[in-house]
Structures are given as structure tokens and as C-alpha cells.
Amino acid sequence: MIMSDITRVIEQVSRDRGIDKEVLVRTLEEALGSAARKKFGTKVDIEVRYDEERGEIEVFQFKDVVEKVTEPDLEIDLEEGRKLDAGCQVGDSIGTKMDTTTFGRIAAQSAKQVIIQKMKDAERDVIYESFINRKGEIINGIVQRIDKRDIIVNLGRTEAILPVREQIPKETYRRGDRIRAYILDVLHESRGPQIILSRSHPQFLVALFNTEVPEISEDIVGIVAAAREPGSRAKIAVTSNDSDIDPVGACVGMKGTRVQSVVHELKGEKIDIIPWRTDPAKFVCNALAPAEISRVVIDEANRSMEVIVPDEYLSVAIGKRGQNVRLASKLTGWSIDVRSETTYNEAMRTSYASLMGLPGIGASTADALYEQGFYSIEELANASVEELVQIKGISDKKAQTLLESANQALEALDEDMPEETAGQDTSEGPADEVEDPGDATGP
């Protein structure tokens, strides 16, 4: 290969494959070094250099100058050395340029294999670097094939995989279909970078709104949280940095055009757009919309809430097969227990009566305990003297007496409980069979 050919090939491959020129030069140098060692053995001292100005790759063999040669491949005597360099001395190292055409067919094949392998490695690195910083983006591709229900997507320069676990249930694709997905992860595998796509991840929903709602991309409106049951229903919580802009209205768009574009991409998945609130109780109430909420009992220690709704809103709050309350819980990060007013009031009456049955508790003490959040014998038994003495009318001695009475009553209840029901959940039946009569698309 003439000098200009090498330079031209390096530049063309660098341009076509997106590989840095220096990587290509190092690859050629390693390949020629490998070919030389294949021909002359591994002991020889070989150095390969690329002269950019002349566009030439040169291979030099270095030998030590000695008085008497014992290893011809590694040594040269002083007389021969001085023919190459008149000023050399014993102990110096002299390099002689090798004729690469003498390397032979096997050495050339070895060089070719090195070049191919290094080119593949370089291409893998280039693809990985070009995608690793695109995690979290939406990308378009063409369905290449279906492999054991996983979808292989052609992205142009490389392929990606949409695993079955990241697909929206009941969605079907065929070879040649266009597909839009979220870049979930980019892995640096030995066989090449593996790009993992998702259409079921909540962040795919967030990214779709980011493309459809200019106020989100401009950081005027923000999506604080998102929860999905892919293909069925989703909830997003939104907030605004500008008091003049309604975040829910911005996401819905004129006549619902923006949210409907996202719904169309998700093949009809219903989307609830919820205004985010710093107050967790208000946030939970918003997340359970359109159900009306009567009251909320918060247990911050266990990050749970008991939400009381009018009887006629129980089915709406819970949703079909419990979906509404389940998504609200995922969205807010709080465990939510929805109860009807009738059930709640009956439980309160029962608890109040049990408190009134304890020795030393009259109506005024029971009312005082209720006002401080002690609604049952069990809650009273779990209290401390320090907590109880904060309540008006309860001294240290009375607090101790109340705790003893509550613990004795609990022990008596445990002894009276039939063995077969001990430890079982005695709450009302599952609420996930209640049908949701409403369409939840939109706020």
C-alpha cells in the first residue's frame, strides 16, 4: 500500500465508522507488530511507528550491540553496527527498518484478524459512548425481529432490545413496524453494547409529556411523580413554578390535545393528571380524585393514611379491582387504607365503648383520650406515661393505672380469642372487586 493510500483509508474509515483516527493508527501499529512477531518470533524487539506527515507506517527491529553475537535475532556485533551507525558502542541498541512484504501470508492473515477485532472493539466503544449519555431519552426505531417475545429494534447504527417485561401488555408488533420507546439502560457487554428499551416504565410517560408540553421542557411546569399500570391507567402529579400557569391545564392542552397525544402513543392508557401538594394529606386526597374525602387519619411513623369517604364514593375511591387506590399509593409514596364513613363510625363506636369499659375511665376521660388520638385499647396500651400526662386531667398515677388496665384488657382479649382465628386478618373482605364507574382520563 502506497503512503497516500494509508492516510486516505484511515480518514475514510474514521469518517464512515465514527472511529477516532488515533484509535485506527494504534490498531494498524498493533496489527503490524503482531504480524512481525508471527514471522520472527516473540523474542524480537519490534517497534511500529506511523509517520503522519509521510503517511507511512514503519516497522523497526531493535538489536543490542555486542562483542560476540549469540542470539542473531536480538544482537548485532560492533562491526555490523558501525555500518549502520558509525558512532555506536557496545551496549547500544540499534533499530533497522524491516521490509513488511517479507512477513508472509500467515503473518498478514494474523494482522488482518487483529485489525478486524480492534475495529469491532472500537466500533462498540463508539456506539456505547454515543448512547450512554442518552439514557432517559425517547428513541424511534424499526422492529427488526421478535426473539422469544423480546423485540429487537433497529436503531440505524446498532440494535436495541425491548424485553417482554418492558412491553405494554397486549401490544403487538410485526417486523418493519415503527416503534417509539424509552432508553432504560445501556450495558457495556463483551459482544457489544446492549441498549435496553422500555414502553412500560413510568419515566416513558414522563418523557412523552416532556415532548408534548413545552412548559415542561422549559421548566415552568414539573412532573413530581408518576405511577402506571401499563396499558390500563396512570397518574402523574404536576406542579408549576409560575402562579399564572395551571400545571394541570398545561398538560391537558387545548381541548385535551396534549394528553390525548400521549394516550394515543400508549394505546389508550387512561391518564389522571393530579396537582401536587406539599401537604401529604392534601396530595393523597387529590390522588384519589374524583372521590370526595371526609377525613384523613395520618400515621407518620408508618407512612400510612386512613382515608374516610362518604359511602357513595367508596367504589370511586377504591377503583376497579383496587386500581385507583393502588396507583394513588404508588404516586404519593403513602400506604392508603380507604374506608367508608359507616364502617369507620361503627369502628369508632366500638373502640369508644371498649375504652369506656376500662376501670377508671369515664366519659370525660374517654373524650380527652379521643381528642389526643387514642381511639382504642390497643393504642392506649402502646402509649407511654409521658404521653398520657400531657392530657388534661391525667396525673402520673392515673396514667400508670390506665396503662395497666389497657394491658390487662388486651391480655384478656387474647386469651378469649379462638385459637383458629388468632393471627388471622378479621377485617372486611377485599375491596378490589369494586367496579369504578368513572372514566379517569384527564384531571
Image (spheres, rainbow, N blue to C red):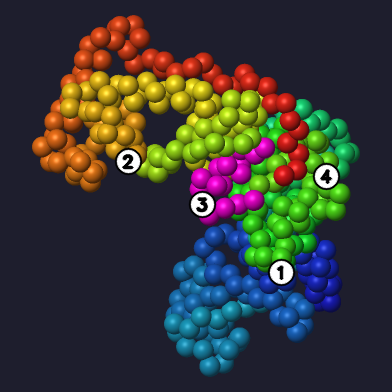
User: What numbered label is drawn on residue 372?
Assistant: 2
Does 136 appear above or below 161? below
Point 18% across, 40% down: residue = 394
Report the span colored magenta. Answer: 275-290
Question: Would you say 380 lies left or right of 222 here?
Answer: left
Q: Is residue 154 visible?
A: no
- Give how far apart the Cα atoms at labels 1 and 4 are: 44 Å
Question: Would you say 358 lies left or right of 138 here?
Answer: left
Q: Which residue is mark 1?
A: 20
User: What numbered label is drawn on residue 279?
Assistant: 3
Q: Which label sits in the foreground, 1 or 2?
A: 2
Residue type, label 2: Gln
Residue type, label 3: Asp
- Give how far apart the Cα atoms at labels 1 and 3 are: 54 Å
Category of crowding for the residue at label 1, using alpha-carbon neighbours closer than 10 angstroms: few (below 14), some (14–19), many (at least 20): some
Does 399 appear above or below 253? above
Please say whether residue 286 is one of the residues in the magenta stretch: yes
